[in-house]
């Protein structure tokens, strides 16, 4: 057995989605950085590398396309995503066709393109790109990691074949998923459902190939939508569970079909094998079992324990946990790759600042750690109460609408403007986020449960339509022209405009919800009055923030490249003359 040592700036344990993206981001942002990746899987990935989720949403797709420069790669190699569609059975005993469901969902192309990713293909291709950029890949197993304190070199002990290697590094990143290398080493995991807002879930999923998609939809919808229903992420709901259907390959017609179930409603013993899962679908979502029967089953997987969070994500001792190693709570809304994107950008900026010995490097680490932990908690909040609410079409549709408002109104512009990396904005965002998680969101969850218990029908809210609140509002509406004018440089996007308008429209939504759900008593409830006044107060605070922002950015161009071209254009003169392209000999 040979034992050797090598030294790097960063060692990344795990070369899955999070690991390969982190490596590329580091190398693109920090010239000449030395990066090593370690993974027990070979570069050529197999069907076994498919994960719980293969879908991206706006922040993740912007990160992949814009920050990692993969726009053309994604277009050419992965399926387009056409938003999210939600389906509730009209009659639980009849689920043979899509007409047997109530629907809310995407009726048009979303403004920011996103993708349905074949994870095995993506990880294989990006690992190859990373190696071409200079990252060193070790096809081996992490045996141990020595997380020395502060800035001392860390040691990652790995086994490659019969050889033992010691990889020394200033920074170590755990992107090894549910192996929890650092999580177990440091007692860093939160797994008890009581500490996860009651979340106690499992997941079963399978991939099928060569499906007959006409069993789902024939593609003809002249009146309902201008986009594809099949290439959306489709969610099917029932008591204590939801099921995804995601197309992940356009050539082989592969589908990922899986369930997230809440143990207190639907036990593991009912869905934890391929036969049980297929039987469950046949009884409760026949349309999906018919699609599977029309195809070739590639694999089946089951996780009995899905949800967990980390106590620390970015440590003072220069170790970091990202991706599933940091937290996963539920695949609902496809948040997973978004949480990876936010973490990666924070990690890169911390490592860049520390390698450059910048004075505020530790301040950034602390702020980004706090931001990502709070963001994880807010994602946890999205699934609080799901066990009771998922199967109720009316209540769940109102909840989805509410959660969409914050996503498109605040979180997307926050990411576009890189406000999640801004040291002055992070405390503002955290204050709003934490108070809502513990206040408004928690109170609403209790009210959702009350309405479910009395089987209240307060209407079906469609999160894509613009005819349900006031002023033509719809959840995809943005309140700054960051898309039209390409305000995609840091701090160019006016996030305060989004925060101001979102808080106002959430207040309108909230009053409407109280009226429909609880009548005048709901509106006059002390908690309701408090929440409305607080939302309007936040809107006013954001208005002041917007005025300050506009004052500080007065005269600043929306896009530097466009402004440079406009300045160059001032000397433009039409030149009606072609340059010669044929030689004298040819002309004769």
Image (cartoon, grey):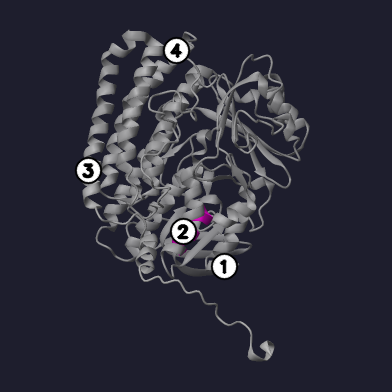
The residues tagged by marks 3 and 1 sit, at their Cα atoms, a distance apart of 47 Å
Disc ID at residue 25: 2
Disc ID at residue 451: 4
User: Please, what secondary structure does the residue beneath circle 2 have?
Assistant: helix
Residue 561 pos. (x, y %): 39, 62
| 124 with respect to 562 (left or right) | right
Q: Residues within 10 Å of mark 2 (few under 14, many from 20)?
A: many
Question: Which residue is identified by label 1?
Answer: 132
The residues tagged by marks 4 and 3 sit, at their Cα atoms, a distance apart of 40 Å
| 270 with respect to 469 (left or right) | right
Residue at the spot 43% in from the left edge and 35% down from the top edge: 379
Q: Residues within 10 Å of mark 4 (few under 14, many from 20)?
A: some
The N terminus, quarter of image: bottom right
The one of 87 and 454 positioned closer to us in this rendering: 87
The question of residue 280 being in magenta is answered with no
Q: Residues within 10 Å of mark 3 (few under 14, many from 20)?
A: some
Q: First in sequence: mark 4 or mark 1? A: 1
The residue mark sitting in front, 3 or 1, is 3
Q: First in sequence: mark 2 or mark 1? A: 2
The one of 61 and 310 positioned closer to us in this rendering: 61
The residues tagged by marks 4 and 1 sit, at their Cα atoms, a distance apart of 56 Å
Q: Main secondary structure of the magenta part?
A: helix
The residues tagged by marks 4 and 2 sit, at their Cα atoms, a distance apart of 46 Å
The residue mark sitting in front, 3 or 2, is 3
User: Please, what secondary structure does the residue beneath circle 1 have?
Assistant: helix
Residue 74 pos. (x, y %): 59, 52
The residues tagged by marks 3 and 2 sit, at their Cα atoms, a distance apart of 34 Å
Q: First in sequence: mark 3 or mark 1? A: 1
User: Please, what secondary structure does the residue beneath circle 4 have?
Assistant: helix
The C terminus, quarter of image: bottom right
Residue bounds of the magenta highlight: 19-27
The one of 143 and 94 positioned closer to us in this rendering: 94
């Amino acid at each position: 057995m040979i034992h050797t040592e090598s030294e790097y700036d960063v060692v990344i344990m795990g070369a899955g989605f999070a690991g390969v993206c982190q490596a590329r981001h580091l190398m693109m942002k920090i010239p000449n950085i030395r990066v090593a990746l370690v993974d027990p899987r070979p570069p050529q990935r197999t069907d076994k590398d498919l994960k719980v989720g293969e879908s991206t949403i706006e922040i993740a797709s912007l990160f992949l396309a814009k920050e990692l420069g993969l726009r053309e790669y994604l277009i050419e190699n992965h399926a387009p995503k056409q938003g999210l569609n939600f389906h509730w059975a009209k009659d639980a005993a009849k689920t043979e066709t899509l007409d047997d469901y109530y629907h809310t969902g995407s009726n048009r192309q979303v403004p920011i393109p996103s993708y349905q990713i074949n994870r095995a293909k993506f990880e294989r291709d990006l690992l190859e790109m990373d190696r071409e950029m200079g990252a060193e890949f070790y096809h081996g197993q992490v045996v141990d990691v020595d997380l020395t304190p502060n800035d001392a070199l860390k040691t990652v002990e790995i086994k490659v074949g019969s050889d033992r290697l010691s990889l020394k590094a200033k920074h170590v990143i755990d992107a090894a998923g549910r192996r929890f290398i650092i999580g177990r080493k440091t007692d860093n995991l939160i797994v008890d459902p009581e500490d996860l807002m009651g979340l106690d879930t499992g997941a079963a999923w399978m991939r099928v190939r060569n499906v007959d998609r006409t069993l789902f939809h024939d593609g003809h919808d002249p009146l309902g939508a201008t986009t594809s229903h099949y290439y959306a992420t489709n969610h099917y709901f029932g008591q204590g569970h939801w099921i995804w259907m995601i197309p992940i390959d356009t050539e082989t017609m592969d589908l990922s079909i899986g369930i997230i179930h809440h143990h207190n409603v639907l036990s593991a013993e009912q869905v934890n094998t391929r036969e049980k899962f297929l039987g469950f679908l046949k009884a409760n979502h026949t349309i999906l079992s018919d699609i599977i029967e029309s195809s070739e089953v590639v694999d089946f997987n089951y996780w009995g324990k899905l949800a967990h969070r980390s106590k620390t994500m970015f440590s003072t001792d220069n170790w970091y946990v990202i991706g599933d190693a940091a937290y996963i709570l539920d695949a609902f809304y496809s948040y997973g790759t978004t949480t990876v994107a936010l973490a990666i950008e924070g990690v890169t900026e911390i490592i860049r600042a520390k390698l450059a010995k910048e004075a505020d490097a530790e301040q950034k680490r602390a702020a980004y750690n706090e931001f990502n932990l709070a963001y994880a908690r807010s994602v946890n909040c999205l699934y609080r109460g799901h066990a009771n609410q998922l199967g109720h079409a009316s209540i769940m549709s109102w909840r989805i609408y509410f959660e969409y408002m914050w996503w498109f109104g605040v979180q997307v512009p926050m990411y576009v403007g890189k406000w999640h990396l801004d040291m002055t904005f992070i405390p503002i965002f955290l204050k709003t986020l934490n108070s809502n998680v513990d206040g408004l969101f928690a109170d609403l969850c209790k009210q959702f449960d009350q309405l479910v218990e009395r089987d209240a029908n307060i209407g079906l809210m469609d999160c894509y339509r613009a005819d349900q609140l006031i002023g033509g509002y719809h959840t995809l509406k943005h309140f700054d022209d960051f898309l039209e004018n390409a305000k995609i440089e840091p701090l160019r996007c006016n996030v305060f405009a989004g925060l101001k308008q979102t808080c106002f429209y959430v207040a309108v939504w909230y009053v409407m919800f109280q009226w429909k759900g609880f009548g005048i008593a709901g509106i006059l409830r002390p908690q309701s009055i408090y929440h409305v006044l607080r939302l309007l107060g936040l809107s006013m605070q954001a208005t002041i923030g917007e005025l300050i922002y506009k004052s500080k950015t007065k005269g600043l161009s929306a896009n530097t490249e466009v402004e440079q071209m406009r300045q160059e254009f001032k000397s433009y003169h039409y030149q009606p003359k072609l340059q010669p392209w044929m030689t004298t000999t040819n002309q004769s």
